[in-house]
Amino acid sequence: MCDHDPHGALPIDADAELHRLGFSRRDMLRTAGIALAAGALSAVVGGTSTSSAAASVAMRPPVGDPQLAWLVGDHHVHTQFSHDAKYRVTQQLDAAQRYGVDWLAFTEHSNFAHAERGLPAAREQLQLERDRRGMLIFQGLEWYIPAAEHATVLVAPGPADARVLRAFELAWDGKLNGWDKPVGEAQAAEFERRAAEAIAWLGAQKRAGVIDDAVALANHPMRLGIDSPHELRVWRDADPDIMIGMEGAPGAQGSAVGQYSGPGDQRGEYVNSPRPDSWPGYPADAYRPYGGFDWATATVGGLWDALLAEGKPYWITSNSDNHLTVKDTWVTGDYPAGEPYASLPSEFDRWAVLGKRPDPVDTGAPQGGSDFWPGQFSRLHTGVVTRSYAGVLEAMRRGRMWVDHGHLLGGLDVRARADMPGKGAGRGNGAGGGWGNAAGRGVTLGGRLAARRGQDVVVTITVTTTDYVNAAGILPELAHVDLIAGPVTGAVSDADTVRAPETRVVRQFDTTGTRGTFTLTHVFERVDRPFYVRFRGSDGNRNGAGYHGAAVDPTGPIVHGDSDADPWKDTWFYANPIFVDVA
């Protein structure tokens, strides 16, 4: 999760390397420009208008109610091939399998040493592990978005995956190209345009068949406050098939309980204040986590809801962002004696020689760290139709995802269907009678349900509680499940909008003491306009009035105090929305 200064690395001739890879910067810019134009990107970068691209995504045919297998994944993991992490590839994979992870993505930090040396070296190791493990293993990238934060970039394995990742890193990375901290509005607009071009270019590689598939999403968006609302919209509109959303909860969830933690430390290392390039519209509260989740996600009626209220399919995830595990006993080994290491002034320079840190050594003594192993605390559940790389990426793109902390849930299945209006438990028996798709096929998370005006929309939530103790020795208990809903009102006039004023918690189910598998049902009666509904719940240990007040969110997540940020004692699940189109 750390930033770094890459100027100590030995630079390479990026244009010459791009040429060797079969690309030219000029052609990449041209391809990106054509892709942006084809996508009708009309957002004025840094301005106030929004694109019609999101509307075109919203108008796609509704996704039905597929039979899904739920795979646990982690899309944001680092190894010794990142300058600030220490574990071998095999250590991360062993831990992931121990905690029930089915797929995992290695997302090393962008820089010249990674592009030139680390990426190809890591690829060889990952291919060996793919051949011997029953896991889906992605090689991705943590991209420094121009003028903004980091992003996960995932590419499906294939003959050109490493080549495209390397070209993307060299041509579009904000750190490598000096596009990270803009000075003035003109430069900010230029850098923001580069970010949109990068996303459009990656989408063009998919459409041209150079790669099979790719997705990207913003990492820890509120950590520094430099991902402005209009940038989140611009990235999504640049190619909605590629930029699918953001981390709803950051990694580094153990930062307040690590070996060297102190008063004021917060989950996710969210301890910052605004800096010169932070978006000025964010309040100071936005830089802190709420129940371990990012302010943009945790605030009912806040930034995430503002995006959903436009009808944007904008999804959230969770991950470990593992660099250094809480209180583990491993330290980075010594670099070889002699040159070139002896003369290099910094750890980053020594790492850059090979783009890899030495293998770690077990000391037997607890070390510093803020992270949990993949799957140990934070889990991303993806609903796939096929157990494959394509299946995972398509599940992510479609929003068939829910996340939990501390293994709060054993399982979650959400379905929505349109039904005839009526009284009683039956709510109409689906006989039709001119009601179109009454009692017709439903949809699941990320889906779009078509309903007729005046129909009821029935939402069923099937929960399976966890029947084992988690890594902290706690048997998780679910105290409540919340339905959060708001109308879809269309594109906003101000691309920096952070408020969905009509969104609120519409129902809370008390699940205290309920165990096993059970189903909760809510009926939206006689619907008359488009809306969305999303889902949330917690162990009930820490609740309070939400950011916009108890009338909007009576028992929402709250900010931790200076010395009570133990993540295991405040666990939540969040699920992506279902959209309901009413005509």
Image: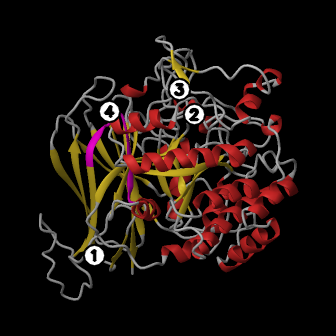
Within 10 angstroms of label 2, few (less than 14), some, or many (20 or more) residues? many
Residue behind mark 4 = 540
Is 546 inside the magenta-drawn segment? Answer: no
Q: Nearer the viewer, mark 1 or mark 2?
A: 2
Q: What main secondary structure does the magenta stretch of the protein show?
A: strand
The 10 Å Cα crowd at callout 1, few under 14, some 14 to 19, many 20 or more, is many
> Could you tell me how far apart the alpha carbons at marks 3 and 2 are, in whole angstroms?
16 Å
Residue 479 place in picture, x, y as percent: 27, 36
Q: Splitting the image into 4 quarters, where does residue 191 fall?
A: bottom right
- Going by the image, does 567 lie left or right of 182? left
For badge 2, the amino acid type reads Arg
Question: Do residues under tags 3 and 1 come within 8 Å of each other at their CB atoms?
Answer: no
The reply to whether residue 552 is in sight is no
Q: Earlier in the sequence, mark 3 or mark 2?
A: 2
Give the residue type at disc 3. Ser
| Camera-nearest residue between 74 and 340 | 340
Where does label 3 land, which residue?
Answer: 370
Separation of residues labelled 3 and 4 (CA atoms):
24 Å
- Any mark on residue 288, and which? 2
User: Residue 40 versus residue 115: which sits nearer the camera?
Assistant: 115
> In the rendered image, which residue does mark 1 sit on?
455
Residue 77 vs residue 299, the one in the foreground: 77
Marks 3 and 4: CB-CB under 8 Å? no
Residue 476 visible in the picture: yes
The residue at 63%/30% (across/down) is 357
The N terminus is located in which quarter? top right
Task: Give the foreground label among 3 and 2.
Answer: 3
Please, what secondary structure does the residue beneath circle 4 have?
loop
What residue is shown at x 23% (from left), y 78% (from top)? 440
- Amino acid on which the number 1 mark rests in the picture: Gln
